[in-house]
Amino acid sequence: MQFLYLAIIFILGLLIFYYKLIYNSIRDRLRIYHYLSKFDGPLAFPLVGNLYLVNIFDISKLVDQVLNLAWYYCNKGCGIVQLWIGPVPMLAVVNPIHAKEILESNEVITKADEYEILFPWLGRGLLTSTGDKWRQRRKMLTPAFHFKVLNDFLSVHDYQAKVFLDQIKQFADSGEEVDLFPYIKRMALDIICETSMGATVDAQNNHDHQYVESVRRLSEIGFLWIIYPWLKIKPIWYLSGYGAEYDRHLKIVLDFTRNVIEEKWTEYQQYQLGAEKKDKRSMAFLDLLLQLRSEGLMNEEDIREEVDTFMFEGHDTTAASMGWTLWCMAHNPEIQEKVIEEVDRIFGGSDRDCTNEDLKQMKYLEKCLKESLRMFPPVPFFGRKVEKDVVIHGNFLPKGVRIILVPLVLQRNPLLFENPNVYDPENFSEEKMSNRHAYSDVPFSAGPRNCIGQKFAMMEEKAVISWFFRKYRIRANVAFEDAKILPEIIMKSSLGFPVTITHRMDNK
């Protein structure tokens, strides 16, 4: 009995000691409940919230379930929908008018807590930082994406594209079906390493390159951490085995980039430190970072954060985009032929390298790339955290709530796109684009936090895809819809991209 009294006194003591914290937490929670109740949304239950509406244990079905739920509220005329992901309050943006105000807001720029799994990997780099640090980094890094720099990368795109074509030639020779995705990923990694860091990795000739495998697993495990609330509890995270595996792959990735940075810094000190400073608008990514380090504006860890951010975003997203584009072409031979006609008109059957002028002439290929980005945006969602009360399009958004914008919801909305699940490059004709809201299509995000490397990505994808169709045709034996979207950190295909390649000379 004495023990019971002591326990009661101890609990009361804790309540008295933390009463203010407890009171404030309950008050803030009730405040969020109050303001979220003003938004339409599905019925939520304690602890699980709205998770009962989707099968989070079968990721291949998750996208269709989310889209069906979103379209229901789109048809009701909703712009923002309240959701509870477990106990976490969220507002999902389903209308381009509201998306514009969210993405253009300078008040709602902090990434949501769902990005925390990326912090050990990408640190507080451009993708994950906020406030003054993000603004300063954005301003400092923008020169690395000047057109003068990007044009210099064309030779890298050309060279690595030709290595890629050589890698897959054996399948065109044999007629054997091949999953193109691993080949595209290795090519994209070689391109980003050479362009951003001036380093040669040669992943295309080293199919067991550990960096590629580690990035793949980090993406897969990271997405599980996001959708399964219980994995955020550290003991469960490590008891599940995911924590230790994540740490192991994280070390491989970080060691890789740190070694490259250290080598380039040593080289920079030997050959450039003390030399006349270059125009930042003509410097490649890592060169710019090293000069900023020599000027005391960045330290070693700052550089590591940005290199890892650009390495990840610059190869996984472009690889996914190119893979989905070729998958769409494999199922649409008439569209493929139009691309081939355009490529032949530009290059005339020659094997010369691409120029910037060539890329500008690839009008139809650009529409094809934009359409695959519409149907299969590489980034599954954009998340923001409301750090202070804000009004967006007349809606009061309370501090503490998270905002989520799913590009796929906007970009496959039947109210915005006719036949949204059909691949149609003419969705990006001037006429159709002029008749719909600009924020109906945001694969690279938009506003102040838009993707800084989107021009780099489009140049790379145009160069590589045009090289592909200068040599090959492509077809698929697997149904288009059988490739389910897996919304990991990057949108991937459940099947990869199994296709059959043929030499163009064989089937004209």
Image: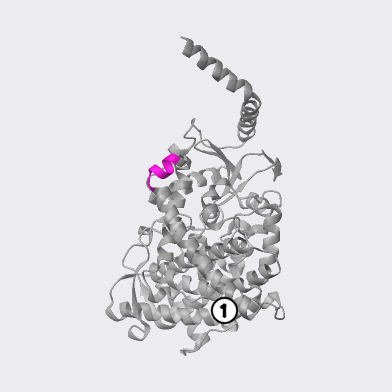
x and y percentages locating residue 129 in the rendered image: 63, 54
Would you say 442 lies left or right of 181 here?
right
Q: Position of residue 292 (x, y in %)?
A: 68, 68
Q: Position of residue 250 (x, y in %)?
A: 46, 57
Residue 45's place in the image compared with 505, above or below, is above
Q: Callout 1, which amino acid?
A: Phe
Q: Is residue 231 visible?
A: yes
Instruction: Determine if residue 78 is in view.
Output: no
- In depth, the one of 409 and 460 nearer the eye is 460
Residue at coordinates 40% horizontally, 69% vertically from top-left?
209
149 in the magenta segment:
no
Residue 487 versus residue 14: which sits nearer the camera?
Answer: 14
Q: Which residues are magenta?
A: 235-241
Per the picture, the main secondary structure of the magenta-coloured stretch is helix
Q: Quadrant of the C terminus?
A: bottom left
In the rendered image, the vertical position of residue 73 relative to residue 259, given as above or below: above
Residue at the top extreme, as displayed:
1
Give the residue drawn at x 30%, y 71%. Answer: 177
User: Which coloring applies here?
Assistant: one colour
Give the answer, above or below, for where 392 lies relative to 497.
Answer: above
Q: In x, y percent, where is residue 430?
A: 61, 69
Q: Secondary structure at mark 1?
A: loop
Residue position marked by numbered label 1 in the rendering? 153
| Residue in the image at 71% along x and 43% along y | 391
Q: In the rendered view, would you say 239 is above or below 10?
A: below
